[in-house]
Amino acid sequence: MEKEKTKKPLKMKDSFRILSFIFAAILVSACSKKVVFPVSQVAPAAEAVLKVDKDNNNNYEIDLEVTNLAEPRRLTPARSHYVVWMVTKEHGTINIGNLNINRKNNGEITTTTPYEPIRIFITAEDERNPVLPSTQVVLNSENFKV
């Protein structure tokens, strides 16, 4: 004869642990700022999502994912590189790196900075490491607060 399995109710202690874990997960995800970029006039098919987290050392982790962005040589005028810029409250505009686009027209950049970002934008550039952004802004976030 087969024994029928009966489900035992969770002990109060175990229920509390599970609820605590769920609550902690919600808190961790709530600390992250997620910014969706508006539609670009230069690259209307491109979509960008930015996540900004503040860590325990008061640094900001920036994770930018871009999809459906054509290679910079396909722009008018054609360029060689995409560069990601961060606007900060107290330190102006900073080059935070190049955005390389793969064969599927997607790119990602992750970096950490001690400066609080208030806006992120991507420009098309002829140089790999420009000091100042060009006027060809491809994607531009709204101002945000972390």
Image: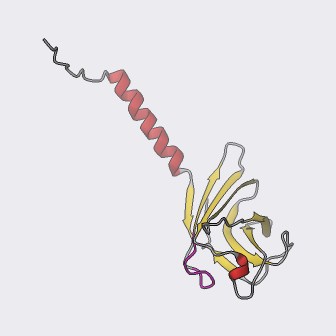
Q: Position of residue 140 (x, y in %)?
A: 64, 75
Hey, which quadrant is residue 120 in on the image?
Answer: bottom right
Residue that sits furthest to the bottom in the current view:
76
Q: Position of residue 76 (x, y in %)?
A: 71, 88
Residue 99 is left or right of residue 16, and the answer is right
Instruction: Report the magenta stretch's main SS.
Output: loop
Query: In the figure, 27 relative to 12: above or below?
Result: below
> Residue at horizontal 64%, vertical 61%?
64
Query: In the figure, 141 relative to 42: above or below?
Result: above
Q: Position of residue 52 (x, y in %)?
A: 62, 57
Residue 69 is left or right of residue 5, and the answer is right
Hey, which quadrant is residue 8 in on the image?
Answer: top left
Residue that sits furthest to the left in the current view:
1
Hey, which quadrant is residue 143 in on the image?
Answer: bottom right
Front position in the image: 30 or 98:
98
Q: Is residue 86 magenta?
A: no
Quarter of the figure that contains the C terminus: bottom right
Residue that sits furthest to the front in the current view:
103
Query: In the figure, 81 relative to 44: above or below?
Result: above
Q: Is residue 45 magenta?
A: yes
Front position in the image: 100 or 20:
100
Query: In the figure, 104 relative to 61: above or below?
Result: below
Label total for image: 0
Front position in the image: 42 or 74:
74
Q: Position of residue 126 (x, y in %)?
A: 82, 78
Quarter of the figure that contains the N terminus: top left
Q: State the extent of the magenta-drawn residues as a range.
A: 40-47
Residue 11 is left or right of residue 93, and the answer is left
> Residue at horizontal 84%, vertical 70%?
128
